[in-house]
Each structure stands twice: as structure tokens, then as C-alpha cells.
Image: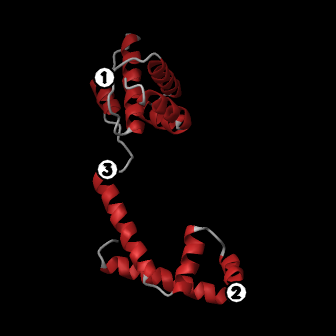
Amino acid sequence: MNEQARPALMELLTQSYGELRRRLTRALGSDDLADDALHDTWLQLRRKEGTVTDVLNPRAFLMRMAVNSAISSLRSRNRAVPRAEIDALLDVADPTPGPEQVAGGRADLEALTHFIGTMPQRRQDILLLVRLEGLSQRDVAARLGVSLSTVEQELKKANLYCAKRMRMAGRQ
């Protein structure tokens, strides 16, 4: 295993333990089996077992390691595992977006950024303060020295404008 990949994988396993455990429990149908599989995965990473040069999707890699560990554990317990169950375990869907989705998301973001930039400055400010910075409409009104009604109207216009432009650009 690549010496640089191992610490990153161990850190990711620690940080996303809860999510991985939930997904494994759902896939394996057993809390205990999911816990054992994650523990075995941790031990494999610590013992430097296996050889990995590049990990393109660390989350999916950890999930696959855990599923493989669970399958090995089931087999070693001399439990007859039906073929359908093994197939179901091996068919764990990867929830991360693929290259096409990432590219589409970036294109959508670029288009939206462009459309926001074509709006009047006050409208841009209101939209970004509410949607990006998470300020309440009342706080935006106070910050910009305008009425709450003005913020509400400008935000509505900004949302409608962006939605219309994205639709026209085929981005929605």
C-alpha cells in the first residue's frame, strides 16, 4: 500500500466511521457484521496489508475493503452464504458523483455565477448574503440599510431571474 495513501485512508475511516457503518449495516443486514468489517478494515490498514498505488475514490475503496472483509468473515465462519447474498454485497452502489456529474455540476455553477454577475449589484448582494452566507432577510435589510420588503422583493426577483436563465441555458 502506498505510504501516503494509508494515513489518509485511516483518517477518512475514522472521520466517516458512522456513515460507513450505516451503509454497511444496510448492505450486510447486521450491525455486528458491519462493526467487525470496519474493525478488520482498520486492522488491515494498520498492518499495511495489500498493495495500493492510487486510490481514486477513498470512500468507495474503504467500503469495498469492508465488504470484502465481511465476505471473508462469513466464509470463515463456515456459514453457507447464498450466491445472491454475495452478489448483493458486491453490488454496493457508490454514492459519490461520477466524472459526468462533477463536470455537469461545475458547468451549472459557472453558468449560475455568470447569471448572478449580470444582475444589479444590490440584487446580487442580497442573493449572496441570504443564500451563500446564510443571513436572515431581516439581517440583510439591516446590513444594507433597506427595508425588509425590499430584501424580500429583490430576493424573489433574483431567484426567478436565475431559475429562468438556467432553464433557458438548459442547465435545469
Using the image as rendered, state which of residue 87 and residue 9 is in the foreground. Answer: 9
Q: Amino acid at mark 1?
A: Pro
Mark 1 nearby-residue class (10 Å; few <14, some 14–19, many ≥20): few
Residue at x 46% of width, y 31% of height: 9
- Relative placement, left or right, of 36 versus 96 is right
Using the image as rendered, state which of residue 62 and residue 84 is in the foreground. Answer: 62
Indicate which disc, 1 or 3, sits on the residue closer to the N terminus: 1
Question: Which element is circle 1 on?
Answer: loop
What mark, if any, has residue 90 been given in the picture?
A: none
Q: Position of residue 17 (x, y in %)?
A: 53, 34
Depth check, mark 1 against mark 3: the one in front is 3
Query: Does 110 sit above or below residue 118?
Result: above
Residue identified by numbered label 3: 98
Question: Which element is circle 3 on?
Answer: loop
Report which quarter residue 86 is drawn in.
top left
What mark, if any, has residue 145 been given in the picture?
A: 2
- Relative placement, left or right, of 101 versus 153 is left
Indicate which disc, 2 or 1, sits on the residue closer to the N terminus: 1
Residue at x 41% of width, y 16% of height: 73
Residue identified by numbered label 1: 82
Q: Amino acid at mark 2?
A: Gly
Q: Amino acid at mark 3?
A: Gly
Depth check, mark 2 against mark 1: the one in front is 2
Query: Marks 3 and 2, how far apart in space?
Result: 44 Å
Q: Quadrant of the N terminus?
A: top left
Question: Which element is circle 2 on?
Answer: loop
